[in-house]
Amino acid sequence: MKHPLSPLAILWLSTAPMMAGAQVLDLDEITVLAGQSDTELSRTGASVEVLAQEDIDDAPRDTATALSLLPGITLSQNGGTGATSTLRIRGLGSKYIAVRVDGIDVSDPSSTQTSFNFGGLINSGIGRIEVLKGSQSAIHGSEAVGGVIDISSRRSDKLGFSASVTAEAGSYGTKLGAATLSNVTEDGEVTLNVSRIDTDGFSSRDSDTEADGFNQTDLRLTARHAVTDRLTLGMAGLYSDGTLEFDRSTTDPSGEIEQTRKGARVFAEYAGDVIDHEFSVQSFTNDRLDAGSFFTNRFVGKRDKVDYTGHAVLNPRTDLSFGAEWSGESARLDSARYDTSEVAAFAELQYAASDALDVSLALRQDEHEDFGGHTSGRVALAWRIAEDTTLRAVAGTGFRAPSLYELYGPYGNAGLMAETSETYELSLERRFANDSMIKATLFNTAIDNLIDYSFVTSSYDQVPGVTRTRGLELTGRTPLSGAVNLFGSYTLTDTSTPGGGRLARTPKHDLLIGLSGETDWGLRGELSVNHIMDRPDDGFPSQAMPDFTVVHVGTSYAVTDDAELYLRIENLTDKTYQTAAGYNQSGRAAYFGVRASF
């Protein structure tokens, strides 16, 4: 039988790239998110975006900003680097997005909603990011109603020892250093990524001018070793420690948060005669201290998880994946501690109905300690109706259990029920001989009994009825010459609540246009123009949110085969704008750096 590569192996070996302005997505590339087993992008019905290492190097430094330039993804940020940052996929915020770093679930069980704060995540040490859009609860659990973001650390594809270093300095007193050390053998690899950023920053609120700084140290270690032809062992570990200054209110600029994240995952893979097995154990802790808060000062979220996945090739056209998972979460809010647990069983059948049609059927049963059983399903198909034309369709259901903070925090409501959701998606993609492409996607998600904070009851409450997000994504790319490419995307997102309102901080129109180019003598560059239109009022008291346009430009020059200089200018036109009411965004900022490998 064939033995499909594990997610870690795929991420180690895969170097095929994609990004709005870099290279056309290779449809033979493998996605590790779209199903329980690894799948070629051309054969999955799901919407997948991939950022490879070159794309990440050319993108803005903050990972959230880089991701917000992808179609269907928007960002709201309470200040600069390090500040609270919320990504939305098709209007659904961070509480609906599962986030993995080297296979470790890094969402924080002690946050107001179980989610990941992208504020302190920078691109240094990241080698690949995969974004799976739409409801994926049947594949990735209850956090994945809006999608999944999978982040893989930078690795080397060279046998033997290798290293790479980055040094950067620029606006707002920013200094960045990073290094990657790898040793690759025929039987495995080990890689250490280390980075440190220090920035004086700028005032997070628009009510004062005092700068709010940020500093953070990150370490990520990954390793795998083929013990025999059948057995492979591996691990991933991460550690992050940082301090953020912020304006606590319009009259108090003295806020400071210390945050430490640490996690580890170990796994074993065994290639059997009939079934391939993977068993893993992981643990993650997020510790935040806000010593000056009038309410909760310390938030400690912890998650332990054990899971097993089996994969069998039933016949040349049919693959079956199945498994089970246990997870336990706890949240410590000062001296109070709350916890919960969940077990799940899942299965996915991938069937090649013909050489042109692939169908995936997935089913997951979750048994939550507090909210009982929930069944999630997903049907996805990819139909290559012509050699260069693919029709994709997805229908899925999901649920999100209330977070421990929503249930038991200072504004908690122990009577909350789980949210349930349905998602439908239809897309058509056409590729042309000159590497041009165009893709259109319709999407619709309905959430029943959404949980939101109520200013009437001063607690989290259920919103009776259905909350919807629906719209259209358009993506295109074409070469203008042998060295220059034009790319663009447009997303229409129409959101509605049972009361007739809109989902917070979600623009109706998101337009991106850009140029990218590369010469044969080592010069590479990219320019992107992002226009955001028609946002709902925001803040308390509510205020209008104007449209804005922001321009980013980056260029690099290869001095040698192993060293390059780069310059990145963010917000080139020095536009004054906000993505969250009352919070500043960076003015024009320039950063100069050098990358070298040996």
Image (cartoon, rainbow, N blue to C red):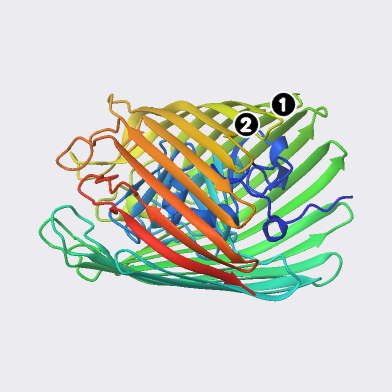
Farthest-out residue, top: 385
Query: What residue type is disc 2 on?
Result: Met
Vertical placement of residue 574 versus 159, above or below = above
Residue that lies at the very extreme toward the left in this rendered image: 251
In this picture, residue 106 sits left or right of residue 426: left
Of pointers 2 and 1, the one earlier in the residue sequence = 1
Of residues 327 and 554, which is closer to you in this image? Answer: 554
Relative to residue 169, is residue 178 drawn left or right? right
User: Camera-side residue: 402 or 55?
Assistant: 55
- Check the image and report above or below for 149 versus 382: below
Instruction: Residue lying at the far bottom in this picture: please name it.
Output: 161
In three-dimensional space, the C-alpha distance between marks 2 and 1, rounded to whole angstroms, equals 17 Å
Residue 387 position, x and y percent, is 76, 26
> Splitting the image into 4 quarters, where does residue 306 fall?
bottom right
Q: Residue at x 85, y 41 (%)?
A: 314
**Residue that numbered label 1 is attached to:** 383
Q: How many labels does the image show?
A: 2
Q: In this view, does 534 lie to the left or right of 40?
A: left
Q: Which amino acid does label 1 sit on?
A: Trp
Quarter-of-image position of residue 20: top right
Q: From where the camera sits, is residue 178 visible?
A: yes
Residue at image location 41% in from the left, 31% down from the top: 448
Q: Of the numbered discs in the image, which one, if any, rests on residue 222?
A: none
Label 1 SS: strand
Residue 478 is situated, as x and y percent measured from the top left of the image, at: 59, 33
From the image, tell me which residue sits under label 2.
437
The C terminus lies in quadrant = bottom right
**Which percent across, then down, holds residue 334?**
29, 68
Would residue 136 be seen by someone viewing this image from the given angle? no
